[in-house]
Image: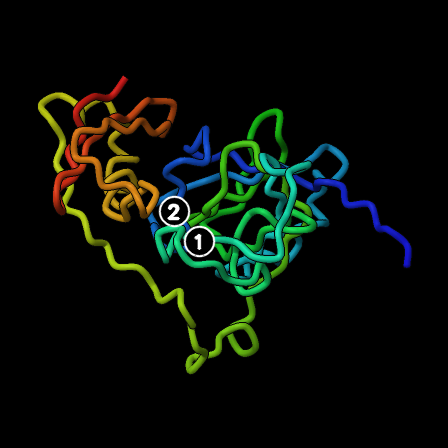
Amino acid sequence: MTNAELRPIATIQSDFGTKFGIPRQSGIVEELKARIVFEPEYRQSETLRGIEEFSHLWLIWQFSENVGAEWSPTVRPPRFGGNIRQGVFATRSPFRPNFLGLSCVKLEAVEEVKGCGLTLLVSGADLMNGTPIFDIKPYLPYSDCIPDAKDGFAPRPDFTLQVEFSEGTLEQIPEEKREALRKVLMCDPRPRYHDDETRVYGMEFAGRDVRFQVKDSLLTVIEVC
């Protein structure tokens, strides 16, 4: 067997400068916007011909922060608070033999950006800013959607937390990004096993450091830097 070399065709520009806070699956927070910027070699209008006819796209990308890390046959999914091990191929853990991720996003627009050529504006992405993308494929409802599929031990999460912003903090976030941030926080970005009500968490979002605390089911944003 020969080893195929994978080369990024694009990178993504998103509001997440670090892994912390990124929704655990794509599509959970539809208000999140991101932009796919192609490498110069692929900035040709021919490569995107017909793509606007599709509403959603599959992204095949790299867990770039984990490249070189050791993988394990079993991992501890956040769903179980890190207390139960499952097989790596039964999870979407980033610690995988080839560090590949798969996400379904909504195509909002094909836009030309100065210095970047044609780009794709997408929503619902769960990728960190700068993540390399190896391939893009159209989502096909007749084959990709299976209504009676089982979700195993990872059912769709609920938006469980109530979110409030301390005085003056919400105004520090660009207006068009406020609802996306609220939905991200409602998903509870903390590790599942964290329950320290005095701990202050910091999350990078849209170039800001969003700091918050959680008590019972209330998340309070206490500072935005």
- Quadrant into which the N terminus falls: bottom right
Q: Circle 1 sits in a helix, a strand or a loop, which is it?
A: loop
Q: How far apart are marks 1 and 2 (CA)?
A: 7 Å
- Quadrant into which the C terminus falls: top left
Q: How crowded is mark 2: few (under 14 residues within 10 Å), some or many (20 or more)?
A: many
Instruction: Farthest residue to the right: give it.
Output: 2
Residue 199 horizontal/vertical position (percent): 22, 29
- Quarter-wise, where is residue 12 in the image? top right
Q: Residue at x 48, y 47 (%)?
A: 109
Q: Which residue is drawn at 61% across and 37% down?
A: 64
Residue 162 relative to residue 81: left or right: left
Residue type (three-letter) at the residue carrying disc 2 = Pro
Viewer-side residue, 71 vs 126:
71
Residue type (three-letter) at the residue carrying disc 1 = Ser
> What colouring method underlies this structural image?
rainbow
- Is 52 located above or below residue 221 in the figure? below
Task: Report the residue marked by disc 2.
Answer: 23
Residue 4 relative to residue 57: left or right: right
Viewer-side residue, 167 vs 151:
151
Viewer-side residue, 85 vs 186:
85
Residue 148 relative to residue 9: left or right: left
Residues at marks 1 and 2 touching, judged by CB atoms closer than 8 Å:
yes
- Quarter-wise, where is residue 10 in the image? top right
Residue 78 horizontal/vertical position (percent): 39, 52
Q: Which residue is drawn at 63% across and 59% down?
A: 137
Q: Residue 26 carries which label?
A: 1
Q: Circle 2 sits in a helix, a strand or a loop, which is it?
A: loop
